[in-house]
Amino acid sequence: MTASAAPARVHRPWLGILFMGIACALFPIMNGLVKLLSASYHFEEVVWARVVSHLVLIVLIFLPRRGWALFRTRQPISQFICSMTLLASTFFFFGAVKYVGVAEAIAISFIAPLAVVFLAWPLLGERITAMRLAAVAVGFTGVLIVIRPGSSVFQWASLMIVASAIAYAIYQIFIRRVAGLDHPSTTVFYSAFGSTIVMSLVVPFVWRTPDNLKDALLLSSLGLFGGIGHYCVARAMTYAPANFIAPFNYTQMIGSVIVGYMLFDEIPDLYTWIGSAVIIAAGLMVGLRSRAKPKT
């Protein structure tokens, strides 16, 4: 194996679940900090801080270990799509989370793993079964219970989160496409590199110097949580198919409830709990079915 080779795809679904679980523990913390910082800074600056600190973190960790192999990719077009779809997802989500509760925002974003189940078939050739289609229908019902059409959750910010979720679904599909061809560290590097270039062109127009050292550290920490989280997502995709791993995104609800309560005194209502339970049940339907038939 050359220095630039990626780990071979091995079907170890529980390792995939473990890596996705770590990612889903980190993302709610990042989202809570984004909501906190967005009260004082333009969300474009928060996005810029997120991608730049992500890029610096990845280079510091992986460049000494992998050298120039970190920059070598066999899938430059797919890596570009990964970078731009992740940036779009981050941009829309960060722009909306200031106006929507942390748990409610995550619940709406659960459209992403549902979309992955559909898109993995035409884009990756991963067969979709009647059971998975039924699970998607159940999960979407859970999302509707959470957002309750006509409630205060339905607003322009909610539409931005929907756009974020669709972009993230495409990102996960292309992550799976490059898994096994590029090393996960290369994937997370390019995801941050392209985003950094774009946002560095935008941030001068909205720049505000951090008010204090605490804010500067919080802005910098976004890349720590996001960078490690997305590395874990890329790693998870090397161990199991996308439509198996995707439903475990639902575990973000647990962390989101905790973060929302601790930082903003947000307590999800009964409908959010019921809808979340339905969504998680749908995810387990897909996951257990995939485990029973690992070759699908």
Image (cartoon, rainbow, N blue to C red):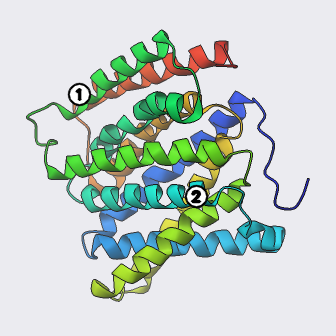
Label 1 element class:
helix
Q: Looking at the image, is 225 positioned above or below residue 16? A: below
Q: Viewer-proximal residue, 68 or 239?
A: 68
Can you give x and y, in whole percent of width and height, for residue 62 in the image?
A: 74, 68
> Which of 247 and 169 lies nearest the eye of the viewer?
169
* Badge 2 element: helix
Viewer-proximal residue, 230 or 40?
230
Q: Residue furthest right?
A: 1
Tag count: 2
Instruction: Please report whichever mark, 2 or 1, sits nearer to the chain's N-terminal start.
Output: 2
Local packing at callout 1 (Cα closer than 10 Å; few below 14, some 14-19, many 20+) is some
Which mark identifies residue 77? 2
| Whether label 2 touches label 1, CB < 8 Å | no
- The residue under the point 64% across, 58% down is 187
Q: Quadrant of residue 79?
A: bottom right
Q: Residue at x 48, y 52 (%)?
A: 27
Left of 145 or right of it: where is 242? Answer: right
* Separation (CA) of disc 2 from disc 1: 35 Å
| Residue 110 visible, this angle | no
Q: Whole-percent x and y of residue 166?
A: 37, 44
Q: Is residue 33 left or right of residue 179?
A: left
Label 2: how many residues lie within 10 Å, few (<14), some (14-19) or many (20+)?
few
Mark 1: amino acid: Leu
Which label number is shown at residue 144? 1
Q: State the image quarter where residue 228 is shown.
A: bottom right
Looking at the rendered structure, the kind of residue marked 2 is: Ile
Q: Residue at x 58, y 27 (%)?
A: 244
